[in-house]
Image (cartoon, helix red, strand yellow):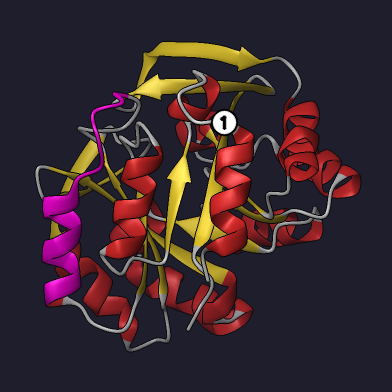
Amino acid sequence: MIEFRVMPAIDLIGGKCVRLEKGDYSTSKTYEQNPVDMAKRLEDAGLRYLHIVDLDGAKSGQIVNFPVLEAIKKSTHLVVDFGGGLKKAEDLRIAFDHGANQVSVGSTAVKQPEVFVSWIQEFGPEKIILSADAKEGKVAMHAWQDVSEFTVSDFITSYKQYGIKDVVCTDISKDGMLVGPGFELYDAIMQEVSDINLIASGGIKDMDDIREVKERGMAGAIVGKAMYEGRISLKQLADFQALAI
């Protein structure tokens, strides 16, 4: 059995920790000026994983906040996945060279499947998380500004044959809203696509939500706003992680 991953999120704009609502950049709220300090607090609390999203990179189409990634990796032993702005193989190399354990890729997997497959073959499927961002059941891309015609389940299924197992699915309608995860969406994916490590993202408001994510057989949960707003403490997250095998 794989370890359930409790994954605190650091979303970066201008090198600071922010949160958005429903992917809308105009709703950006800064919670922490220094993401390295935030990462240290996560590790000191006993957490092991960190999910970093380069929102500047997602918007500009190229990796931007890799110096922050490097600083976090030099200051902690956290297992980090990094996403946002990874449009070329060189972007992935930069992310890995600066400390990323895995990278999360979404838009390129939608728009340029042959390029994404070449990345899987070059870097290995275990190094890549497929990012399936969902808006009304369809896959969204480009910092959630465009919506494709792919259903989330079909999108995930198309890459299973290449060895992809780790999938982060964000329900955009829930993200940053503290209304609970999109369990209906996740249940449908798990019924339609077997043998993947599905990680919930978006909407988590309390520890009960995280418990339910695990109870439904998912592989992990990304926690953002509820942590920053004090609805979930770092100790609660670390205690759950310690037992969540």
Q: Is residue 75 visible?
A: yes
Could you tell me which residue is drawn at 51 percent across and 52 percent down? 87
Report the magenta residues as a range: 177-191
Q: Secondary structure at mark 1?
A: loop
Tell me residue 123's x, y (percent).
Answer: 62, 77
Q: Is residue 184 magenta?
A: yes
Could you tell me which residue is drawn at 36 percent across and 40 percent down? 142
Q: Main secondary structure of the magenta part?
A: helix
Q: Is residue 211 magenta?
A: no
Q: Is residue 219 left or right of residue 155?
A: right
Q: Residues within 10 Å of mark 1 (few under 14, many from 20)?
A: some
Residue 17, quarter of picture: top right
Q: Is residue 92 above or below residue 162?
A: above
- How many circles with numbers are drawn on the protein? 1
Q: Is residue 231 left or right of residue 195?
A: right
Q: Label 1: which residue?
A: 233
Question: 235 or 186: which is nearer to us?
Answer: 235
Tell me residue 26's x, y (percent).
Answer: 38, 10
Q: Is residue 53 visible?
A: no
Residue 132, quarter of picture: bottom left
Could you tell me which residue is drawn at 23 percent across and 82 percent down? 194
Could you tell me which residue is drawn at 26 percent across and 70 percent down? 156
Q: Is residue 85 above or below residue 197?
A: above
- Residue lying furthest right: 74
Question: 81 or 26: which is nearer to us?
Answer: 81
- Name the kind of residue labelled 1 in the image: Ser
Q: Is residue 55 left or right of residue 136?
A: right
